[in-house]
Image: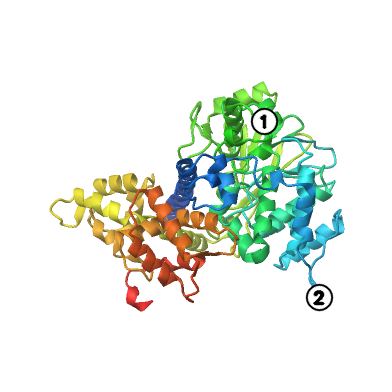
């Protein structure tokens, strides 16, 4: 009997241990599920706001076109009595994708672009001789690793040589694998030089044994777009049969106005910025549109549509399309390069879909309403394209993915994204893919960060990292809320006729979705944005009590509109900055505000514009540094004192 008691006691302990293990396992799984839900929510905030901003950029570009139409007929606009606020260079870019800028220049003019840039006798930086050698490009890599900028003289000459090479290449380039080497495909880099160096460290520099395809979006957003673009073009010159560069939707003059590339050139090259901008713009227009590996794998930046035609893509004149946002116009074609309105529109649509489209699970093909350009293409569209062209896989980029890659459409579409930490440090991995003779994709992931990869993190570290990223996402979201404060408060008050400051949670969610045009999990986000006196009630006024925007201007509907459209205003500013100096005159700033007023259909009073212009002219020289204007609007904790107009 004593033995029986001992066994019963042992079984009880075992059962308790088992129950405890099960409880811990359940808790751990629930905790991981909550972390994943928070991560996905944060991800959706970042991505929704990013694509919403792209929609605004497309709307602004369309407004530019409409405005130019009203100012005067496209070609003879400078001969009209009406004065255009835009510089000559931009007028041509807005109204034609083709016959403008460097396309009209002779070889002698192009050579003079760099020969006219002096190199000081005491210059000790990197010098380039052409044709480039492998040694020189390796020196460029080392030079850029030291965060040094290439002299304008050599940068412009490199662009000139790259343009000559690109003009010899077809719209669709062909690559082949080999028994002894794989082809490496990289996605968006967006100015992240550290990511490019990680790829080179892990995979090797481009060479005959290590060929690469870089699938567009080398520039914009990140701080080292110039260095990435120059480095990739240099490798193209040295290894023209092993390095392939596809155009992305950000290799586009008008996207560069908005997303930082032109600003970066201005900061780094100052007095030589104009010639740099012109040459980069022209080189981008000559980039090939797609690459095909072994006749079986199709690589393009965005994707396809149900009308994608490889024969059309192979035969069109890609350099006509300096921007893919609008088709060039045939009535402004004195040289007769463009013929047939329908043909031009069809070619433009082919390029737009190739650079801007995204895959979706829904069958068919429809407008890409999320971005505002390109299309959504379904698995049936993918299957038909691959079957018609006897291929087996589409590799595309264009979308940030948490793991750096994603398979969709029954593994027939692979998205590859190479810029890690795209939204915030730790927000996503980067990846590249290697294709061998068997044509099977082998993926490599990485992250340029001081944090370890998540799989190697302790649970507390993962939670802390998500909290940091989550906080950054909430700041982005609060900025959107403030930018639409008047519209939100008006909508809230319609739900609260007695002005009690409280509405139902359902009404709050409906209002946030409709006013901000952001489809987010508002129920999960409510506790980070507002106070809730009851689980089904929201104190909507608290949305703006926890934060404010610090600026030196008197707070009015006008300043709110300026904040809401600050990036559109920056694009207008860049367009009007004729000499790419980073400054505009007082009159040009006022004209920018009037253009913005027309775009947003909101009257902006002259006296308010004038006061704002003078308050930004810090040294009273009659010029405005627009970077300081953008820095003037900062989101701060609501408890901090916000300086009034008298405290400037």
In the foreground, 286 or 106: 106
| Residue situated furthest left in the rendering | 498
Q: Is residue 420 left or right of residue 155?
A: left
Residue 313, disc: 1
Distance of mark 1 from mark 2, alpha carbons?
A: 49 Å
Query: For the point 25% across and 49% down, which residue is it?
Result: 491
Residue 352 x, y percent position in the rendering = 58, 36
Residue 164 x, y percent position in the rendering = 79, 45
Residue 458 x, y percent position in the rendering = 54, 61
Residue 4 visible in the shown view: no
Q: Is residue 576 left or right of residue 435?
A: left
Discs 1/2, front? 2
The residue tagged with tag 2: helix, strand or loop?
loop
Q: Is residue 293 left or right of residue 500?
A: right
Residue 218 x, y percent position in the rendering = 65, 51
Quadrant of residue 510 in the image? top left
Quadrant of residue 578 in the image? bottom right
Quadrant the C terminus occupies: bottom left
Read off the residue under disc 2: 122
Query: For the point 33% across and 45% down, which residue is it?
Result: 513
Residue 66 visible in the shown view: yes
In the foreground, 628 or 227: 628
Total tally of numbered discs in the picture: 2
In the foreground, 152 or 292: 152
Give above or below for 298 relative to 72.
Answer: above
Give above or below for 233 relative to 411.
Answer: below
Query: For the point 83% across and 37% down, which residue is it?
Result: 178
Query: For the point 74% across and 52% down, which residue is it?
Result: 232
| Residue situated furthest top in the rendering | 388
């Amino acid at each position: 009997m004593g033995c029986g008691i001992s066994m019963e006691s042992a079984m009880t302990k075992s059962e308790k241990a088992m129950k405890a293990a099960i409880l811990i396992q359940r808790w751990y799984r629930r905790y991981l599920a909550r972390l994943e839900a928070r991560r996905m929510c944060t991800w959706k905030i970042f991505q929704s706001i990013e694509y919403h901003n792209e929609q605004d950029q497309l709307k602004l570009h369309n407004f530019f076109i409409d405005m130019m139409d009203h100012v005067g007929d496209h070609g003879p606009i400078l001969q009209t009595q009406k004065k255009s606020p835009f510089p000559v260079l931009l007028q041509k870019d807005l109204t034609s994708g083709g016959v403008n800028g460097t396309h009209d220049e002779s070889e002698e003019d192009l050579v003079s672009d760099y020969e006219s840039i002096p190199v000081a006798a005491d210059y000790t930086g990197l010098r380039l001789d052409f044709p480039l050698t492998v040694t020189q490009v390796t020196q460029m890599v080392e030079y850029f690793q030291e965060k040094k900028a290439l002299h304008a003289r050599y940068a412009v000459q490199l662009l000139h040589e790259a343009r000559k090479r690109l003009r010899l290449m077809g719209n669709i380039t062909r690559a082949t694998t080999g028994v002894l080497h794989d082809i490496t495909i990289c996605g968006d880099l967006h100015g992240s030089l550290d990511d490019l160096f990680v790829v080179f460290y892990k995979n090797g520099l481009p060479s005959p044994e290590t060929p690469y395809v870089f699938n567009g979006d080398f520039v914009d957003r990140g701080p080292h777009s110039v260095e990435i673009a120059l480095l990739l073009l240099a490798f193209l010159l040295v290894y023209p049969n092993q390095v392939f560069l596809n155009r992305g939707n950000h290799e586009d003059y008008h996207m560069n106005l908005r997303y930082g590339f032109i600003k970066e050139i201005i900061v780094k090259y100052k007095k030589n910025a104009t010639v740099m901008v012109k040459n980069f713009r022209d080189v981008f227009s000559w980039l090939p549109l797609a690459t095909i590996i072994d006749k079986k794998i199709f690589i393009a930046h965005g994707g396809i549509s149900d009308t994608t035609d490889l024969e059309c893509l192979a035969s069109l004149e890609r350099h006509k399309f300096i921007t893919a946002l609008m088709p060039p116009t045939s009535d402004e074609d004195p040289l007769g390069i463009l013929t047939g309105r329908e043909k031009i529109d069809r070619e433009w649509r082919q390029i737009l879909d190739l650079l801007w489209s995204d895959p979706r699970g829904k069958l068919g093909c429809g407008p890409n309403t999320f971005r505002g350009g390109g299309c959504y293409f379904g698995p049936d569209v993918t299957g038909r394209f691959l079957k018609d062209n006897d291929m087996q896989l589409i590799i595309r980029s264009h979308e940030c993915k948490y793991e750096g890659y994603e398979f969709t459409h029954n593994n027939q579409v692979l998205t590859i994204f190479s810029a890690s930490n795209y939204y915030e440090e730790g927000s996503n991995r980067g990846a590249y893919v290697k294709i061998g003779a068997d044509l099977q994709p082998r993926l490599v992931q990485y992250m340029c960060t001081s944090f370890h990869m998540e799989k190697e993190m302790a649970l507390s570290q993962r939670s802390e990292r998500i909290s940091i990223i989550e906080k950054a996402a909430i700041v982005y979201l609060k900025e959107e809320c403030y930018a639409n404060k008047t519209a939100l408060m008006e909508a809230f008050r319609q739900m609260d006729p007695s002005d009690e400051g409280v509405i139902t949670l359902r009404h709050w969610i409906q209002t946030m979705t409709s006013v901000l045009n952001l489809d987010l999990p508002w129920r999960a986000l409510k506790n980070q944005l507002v106070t809730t006196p009851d689980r089904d009630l929201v104190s909507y006024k608290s949305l703006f009590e926890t934060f404010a925007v610090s600026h030196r201007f008197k707070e009015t509907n006008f300043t709110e509109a300026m904040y809401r459209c600050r990036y559109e205003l920056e694009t207008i500013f860049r367009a009007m900055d004729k000499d790419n100096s980073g400054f505009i005159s007082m009159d040009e700033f006022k004209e920018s505000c009037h253009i913005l007023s027309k775009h947003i259909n909101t009257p902006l009073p002259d006296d308010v514009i004038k006061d704002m212009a003078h308050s930004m002219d810090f040294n009273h020289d009659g010029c405005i540094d627009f970077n300081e204007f953008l820095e003037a609007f900062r989101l701060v904790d609501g408890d901090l004192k916000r300086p009034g107009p008298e405290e400037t």
